[in-house]
Every structure is written in structure tokens, then in C-alpha cells.
Amino acid sequence: MYNPATDRSPISPSFTPNPFDKYKSAREGMLPDGINGIGTGSWPDRFSARKKVGERRRIVRVLVVAFLVGFLLWFFVTPLNWTSGRNSGELYTQPETGTRTEGKAQHDSADVDTPSPVGEGQTIPQDSKVQFGKEKASFVMLIRNQELQDALKSMKQIEDRFNHRFHYPWTFLNDVPFTEEFIRETTKRASGKTEYGLIPKEHWSVPESIDQDKMRTAMKKMEQDRVIYGGSLSYRHMCRFNSGFFWRQELLDKYEWYWRVEPGIGFYCDVDYDPFEFLRLSGKKYGFTITLPEYKSTIPTLWSETLDFMKKNPQYLNSNSSLQYLLDDKDHGKSLSSDPPPEYNGCHFWSNFEIASLDLWRSEAYRSYFDHLDRAGGFFYERWGDAPVHSIAAALFLGTQEVHHFADMGYMHVPWSRCPQPDEFHKYSKCVCPFEKKDSFDLNGWSCQPRWWKIAGKEYGA
Ligand SMILES: Nc1nc2c(ncn2[C@@H]2O[C@H](COP(=O)(O)OP(=O)(O)OP(=O)(O)O)[C@@H](O)[C@H]2O)c(=O)[nH]1
Ligand SMILES: [Mg+2]
């Protein structure tokens, strides 16, 4: 049995664990004369051995010079990154969670001066977080600290299925400061940079114009009537925020596109193209995965307020709008100004998933629509959801061709899920859906998908 410690063979110097050992061995006279030894043996042996040594020294010198040049290049180019933190190499630092800087980033991973530890002896290098995706886009997650585990589950899937190839940044928003644990763990999970925003108080409070007694009475009644989240004030803040304020957060000013992600979702298919780029190149502004009707008890006057707004602002109605997708069967073919006016069927794009243009919400049409709705007070006196608000706006202000069904994506938010139907999406496990294709929500009688298909046709994957 060969033992490198005792059986080092002079005929097979390559057996030495370190090839340079053989020089050491020779100098120490361990090798016998003339048998490929170096520095010992006959003159011809010595001559050829020296020649070999000369060649080896040259190689060593070249390697040393190459190493030094490489080191100098690395030293002068990369330190900018990890000392100023302005570029790709900054390290994550702990945020100051004690102070509330409203409307500003609570923590901005691109605003870091010195590397600092994360957890026990760990740092999170952000130099691997260089964005490869070319769009001005970010994931956006409005989230509570206590939802960290579910946030990580969502992130894990989006990263594995899509973002590990693109490294788009993540923007987290909260009405209270994020905990250090939340920031640390989500930063670790993200392949892109992470930013954390504290929502300004005026974006998360009851406006002065709201009659709070009237609001409380309405909330109580809805709770008694067992309307889902009917008695919750924080849910109302959330819906109003997602309707009128998330796109106004300073952290999002630099972006044109966002992908809304909620905690605890399922994301079942590889996405090997850039959906932001896809939307831009195809002239689309809004993308969804699931469409379904809203609980009518949460929006008794949303549609009449919409009709009122459109009557005053008919210029905002797109000439190729998706109005018919919004209308009750009995009213198909009607226009907004028909007498009596058409009724809303409640269909909306489920806004817990959205890939869309921020400019859609920044537009004059949407701003004035939101202001109109906010003045009407239905976010508090009723319980208007951001999903019907976004969807009505997208359906009326955009052309049908500007709204996209991401039929190639498998998605779940409790209690509904959908996956692509064609076998090609499942054959090589591009999609791994934890349910049978026939149980996809698109085929459920409750889905508004057939209404959408009727006016927009089917997308690839439906
Ligand atoms: N920071 C913060 N985020 C909230 C609050 N309420 C809801 N959210 C977030 O807003 C998003 C929507 O809230 P959800 O509770 O998921 O509402 P939903 O999707 O209609 O209902 P379920 O998912 O069925 O509970 C989620 O990302 C939540 O984490 C809140 O009070 N504060
Ligand atoms: Mg949710």
C-alpha cells in the first residue's frame, strides 16, 4: 500500500502532495544520485536538471508577476465598491430601527459605508447582487414583520423560478419599522439588492374628511354580516395604500415597473425570460394571473362612483377599453352612458400578483380617479379593495391589448391556484404544479377568465 509519508518514490515525484516538495527533498539530499534528482548525480544529469530548474523558475516568475498584476488590478478597481458602498460590492449593514424617517428608506442597501456583521460572524456581500435584468424594475412587497417566514417562502420561489438569472431588486414596505431580523433574512434570500421603506403616516391613516363615527358603525355592521375583513381598519389602510400610495413611495421613484409579491404565495413555473422587458417591448402596461369576482358586499357604491367619475371625465375612457369584461351578462353591449347604466359584474384581476407599469398609476387619469374615490370615502365606509380599483382603472383607461394574462405562469394565493394547461409546460418539469390541470382556477365556474378570453383571446399557456 502506498504511503506518501514513508514511500515517497524518487521515480515518481508527482506523488508528493505539493509538487514543490521535490525541490525541498533534493536540497535536503533525500534523493539518490543520478536518478532524476536535482542538484545531485552526474554532470549531464545535473546539467539537464538545472535546465529544468531554470524553466520552472521562469514559469514561477511568470506566475508571480501575473498574480501581482491581478492583485494590483483588483486592489485599485474593487475597493471603491466596498469602501464607498455606492457600487456593486457594498455590504449589508444593520438599520437603525429606532427612528422613524417617514417617506424615506428605512434601510437602503446601496447606502452603506462600512461592512458590518449580520448574525454571528456573517456578512452579506452585495457584490454578487449586480442586476442583470435591464429594466428599471423592482419586486414590491407590503408586509408585516411577523409575516417573515411566509415572505421568505415567496421570495425563495420567485428567486429560484426567475430572479436568480436577473437579480432584480426587492423593495419592502411597512407601516412600522422593519425588524433587524426581517431585514437580515430577506437580504440574505434576495439575489438582487434590497431596500426597506417606512410608509409615511399620511399614506396609512384615516383622512380628516372621513366621519369616524360613520366608519365605525359601518365596520361593526360588516363584521356582524360576516363580511371578510369587514371589521378591520388595518385591512382598509392596506387597500387604500395599495390603491393610491404604494406607487408614490420615494423608494419606487427610480423604477418604471414593479412585480407585486405577497407572503405565502406559490409560484410553480420557471420564467426564463424577463416579464418586465416583455411588457415594455409588447407595449403592455398591466399583467395578471388570476381573475375572479369581488364580494359585492365590500363595494356597494364603487361602481356608481366610477360611473360618476367617467361621466365627468369621459376623455379617460380608452377607445379600445375592456369595458365588456366588467359588465353583467344582461348588460353586454352597453356603454357607460347607457340608460339605465350597465352593472358591474365584480370581475377583477387578483392584485396579490401584479406585474405592471408604475406609470399607469402615476397617470393623470388614475390619480384623478383615485382622488375621486378617496373623496367618496368608500375605502372606509365600505371596504373597497385595491383589486377592483386597479382592475376597473386598467380595464377602462388601457386598451385591451395593453393588459396581459401571464398564462405561462403557475400561481397560488390561498384559496385559488392556476397553472398552464398545455402538456409542454409540464413535460420537462418547467412547471411543477401541486394539483391536477383540471383543477386550475381558470376552469373553475367562479373564474372570470372566460370573460377575459372572450374579449382578449387566449394567451400562450392558457
Ligand atoms: N405592513 C403591513 N402590511 C399589511 C398589513 N395588512 C396587510 N398587509 C400586507 O398587505 C398584503 C395584503 O394583505 P393580505 O392580508 O394578504 O390581504 P388579502 O390577500 O386580501 O387576504 P389574505 O391573504 O387572504 O389574508 C400582504 O402582503 C400583507 O402582508 C398591515 O397592517 N401592515
Ligand atoms: Mg394575501
Image: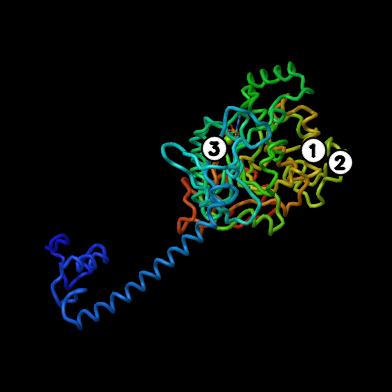
Circle 1 Cα neighbour tier, 10 Å, few/some/many (<14 / 14–19 / ≥20): many
Q: Amino acid at mark 1?
A: Tyr
Tell me the quadrant of the picture where the C terminus can be found: bottom right
- Observer able to see residue 419: no
36 or 287: which is nearer to us?
A: 36
Work out which residue is located at the far bottom of the displayed protein and give it: 44
- Observer able to see residue 245: yes
92 or 166: which is nearer to us?
A: 92
| Disc 2: which residue | 313
Spatial distance from mark 3 to mark 1, Cα to Cα?
Answer: 29 Å
Q: Amino acid at mark 3?
A: Pro
Above-or-below relation of 197 to 317: above
Dot 2 lies on which element? Answer: loop
| Disc 1: which residue | 369
Contact between labelled residues 1 and 2, with CB atoms less than 8 Å apart: yes
Q: Position of residue 295 (x, y in %)?
A: 66, 32
Spatial distance from mark 3 to mark 2, Cα to Cα?
Answer: 37 Å
